[in-house]
Amino acid sequence: MIELGEDARALGISIAFSRVRGVEVRGSGSKVIELAVEEVRRKYTLESLKEDPVVRAYRDFYWRIGIDPTKVRPSSEALVRRILKEGLPSINSVVDSGNAASAITLVPIGLYDLGKVRGKLELRLARPGEIFKPIGGGEKVLSGGEPVLADEDGPIFLYPHRDSVRTMITQGTREVLIVAAGVPGVDASLLRRAASLTLEFILETSGGEGEEVRVIF
């Protein structure tokens, strides 16, 4: 389902992914959010979080691809910080499932409506001038060289931190692609756990039929 380009592979990128068919996106996944909040507050403080080896691996990768992680936090770290400061709001049952799994494992999780994906998916480096339209942000013209997950119409994931509005999860979503985003220093077993936990939470909150998690690197 996903090809890993040699240019992305050279950055040390790895992913775990799965697909869920027949989901019913509901208004809330409050049970999994509550579970994540409880576990995060038991395991971390704002001070200890900075020293976690998984957090440090994503921060190091951000520096490597030209992003200052003190200004743009890795998405999983940002979720945990939000939980520690104020809690985690519910979006919908599928998105809540990904957010909960990401907060628990510290692995960024991308979720995509496969009904809106065109053609094959490839994790590669962006070409100069490609357009990316993130959820909650304005259109971004890519310089080229940024790692992205793209279909035939262009990038749907600015790796490993922003998803596209084009393939976002909505109430009409019926088929979901789960992607756990790995970087150097993050073990494949943790990626598999993050994707598997997301799958488990989606099945619990939204129903459907899931596929076995696969890992590529």
Image: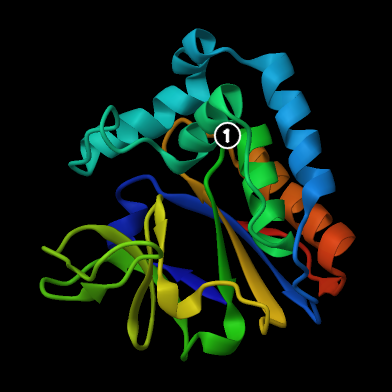
Say what amino acid the circle numbered 1 marks: Leu
134 left or right of 24?
A: left
| Residue 19 occupies quadrant | bottom right
Q: Residues within 10 Å of mark 1 (few under 14, many from 20)?
A: many
Camera-nearest residue between 132 and 196: 132
State the residue at coordinates (68%, 53%): 96
Where in the figure is residue 24, as x and y percent of width and height? 80, 76
Residue 217 seen by the camera: no
Please state the total of marks drawn on the protein image: 1
Where does residue 190 sit, x and y in percent of width and height? Answer: 65, 37
- Residue 113 position (above or below residue 161): below
Mark 1, residue position? 106
**In the displayed structure, would residue 2 be above or below residue 48?**
below
Q: Which x, y percent locates residue 121?
A: 46, 78
Residue 131 pos. (x, y %): 22, 76
**Can residue 141 be seen here?**
yes
Would you place residue 112 above or below residue 191 in this image?
Answer: below
Which residue is drawn at the image coordinates 22% and 44% (left, top)? Answer: 65
| Residue at x 73% of width, y 35% of height | 36
Q: Residue at coordinates 69% horizontally, 44% vertically from top-left?
A: 101
In the picture, measured across the screen, residue 158 lies left or right of residue 55, that is left
Say which element carries label 1: loop
Query: In this orientation, which residue lies closer to the viewer: 204 or 34?
Result: 34
Residue 55 to residue 208: above or below: above
Question: Split into 4 quadrants, where in the image is the N terminus?
Answer: bottom right
Q: Is residue 24 rendered to the left or right of residue 8? A: right
Snapshot quadrant of residue 91: bottom right
